[in-house]
Amino acid sequence: MATLKEKRTCGQRCEDFGHFVWNSDNGTFMGRTPEKWVYISLYYAAFYVVMTGLFSLAIWVLMYTLDPYAPDYQDRLKSPGVMAWPNTYGEEDIEIYYNTSDKSSMKKMSDILHKFLQPYNETKQHECNFYNCTRGKYFIQKTFAGPHHTKWSCPFTQSMLGPCSGLEDPTFGYNSTMPCVVIKMNRIINFLPSNHTELPPYVNCTVLEGHNNVENIEYFPERGVMDLSYFPYYGNLAQPTYVNPLVAVRFRLVRDRKAKLQCRVVSDKITYQHYHDPYEGKVIFYLQAVH
Ligand SMILES: *[C@@H]1O[C@H](CO)[C@@H](O)[C@H](O)[C@H]1NC(C)=O
Ligand SMILES: *[C@@H]1O[C@H](CO)[C@@H](O)[C@H](O)[C@H]1NC(C)=O
Ligand SMILES: *[C@@H]1O[C@H](CO)[C@@H](O)[C@H](O)[C@H]1NC(C)=O
Ligand SMILES: *[C@@H]1O[C@H](CO)[C@@H](O)[C@H](O)[C@H]1NC(C)=O
Ligand SMILES: *[C@@H]1O[C@H](CO)[C@@H](O)[C@H](O)[C@H]1NC(C)=O
Ligand SMILES: *[C@@H]1O[C@H](CO)[C@@H](O)[C@H](O)[C@H]1NC(C)=O
């Protein structure tokens, strides 16, 4: 018991401590002989060498099995999602609502589209994606033949959207009843949309509600095709200059000038009826012009 211990002076304690550090009676240093200290040091040295080895091995195995050009977990995404621009939301759905006689309404829509199309700027595409792609064929690249050890990407320029490019008509038709909506399909690494190469994916828009209010639907590029040369996509590290192909759809609104529309990307490997994902393979939106 501590209480039974006799009280010792400070001087005695210091002496005890000195004795502990170096005990000349039995030749121990900190309670152990020098020989024992050597063994202990050797033991710990070996211990840390083995630990470092194991750690390095684990890291090496991890790095070895990682493909630096593809994310490991792609969320089991098999079929791509589809989005529409201008991406203005109402309560929860995409609602493209504008006023043909209100300049600020027109500007709001065209600003969204101009901003969205910035990566598709002609000069930018000509500088970054100057490869001459063969149209109508998958652009399969086994090697990294592009600049700085990358793969080539096919150019997609704003002007390919014709009257909906924003080049001739900077309002994209939002000053009239012929607005343009741009459709984009999300990228999936190594995804091939179709197994027979004569049929590229294409956008097909249908009127779900308000049939009488939509007189005409036009697609740019022609037939709403997303050329096969934009597939497969190899990932952002392999193809840093890649841009998704786009399809612009121009609707001619008449009478009540409102409709519920669905634009689907049609291809045999693109599904569109996923219960939990309303944007899989298609996008549904409301379009309305007032004045
Ligand atoms: C559309 O804009 C014009 C001009 O700003 C305005 O007079 C009109 O009330 C607007 N229409 C609607 C339905 O908001
Ligand atoms: C494309 O980019 C160039 C240079 O950055 C710029 O001068 C030009 O106005 C842009 N074109 C469009 C349509 O925005
Ligand atoms: C693509 O074709 C154009 C004109 O035909 C040529 O000037 C250019 O060098 C070609 N680019 C590549 C990467 O082959
Ligand atoms: C809309 O704007 C374009 C380009 O500024 C112009 O050519 C066209 O006539 C305009 N349309 C209407 C209905 O004002
Ligand atoms: C293409 O894929 C579909 C379904 O994924 C399959 O039924 C069809 O046999 C395939 N065609 C060819 C030519 O491989
Ligand atoms: C577009 O979809 C509609 C409705 O599903 C269908 O009737 C029409 O044939 C399709 N058009 C094309 C070009 O596939």
Image (cartoon, rainbow, N blue to C red):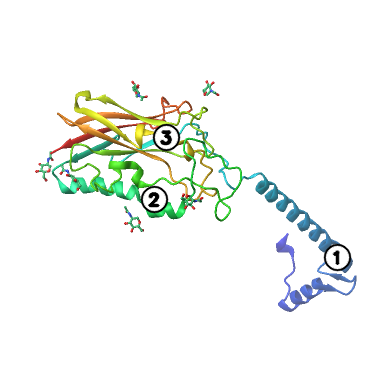
Q: Residue at x 89, y 66 (%)?
A: 35
Q: Is residue 178 left or right of residue 229?
A: left
Amino acid type at mark 3: Gly
Which residue occupies the extreme bottom position in the image?
Answer: 11
Amino acid type at mark 2: Pro
Give the quarter of the image for residue 246.
Answer: top left
Q: Residue at x 46, y 53 (%)?
A: 128
Query: For the residue carrying disc 3, how many other residues have a C-alpha within 10 Å: few (<14), some (14-19), or many (20+)?
Result: many
Is residue 167 or residue 194 the one in the foreground?
167
Looking at the picture, how far across and down is residue 199, in whole percent? 46, 28
The residue identified by callout 2 is 119
Q: Is residue 274 above or below residue 164?
A: above
The residue identified by callout 1 is 38
The residue identified by callout 3 is 81
Q: Is residue 87 above or below residue 201?
A: below
The disc label shown at residue 169, or none: none
Q: Quadrant of the N terminus?
A: bottom right
Earlier in the chain: of badge 3 and badge 2, it is: 3
Q: Quadrant of the C terminus?
A: top left
Q: Residue at x 82, y 63 (%)?
A: 41
Label 1: state its secondary structure: helix
Query: For the residue carrying disc 2, how many other residues have a C-alpha within 10 Å: few (<14), some (14-19), or many (20+)?
Result: some
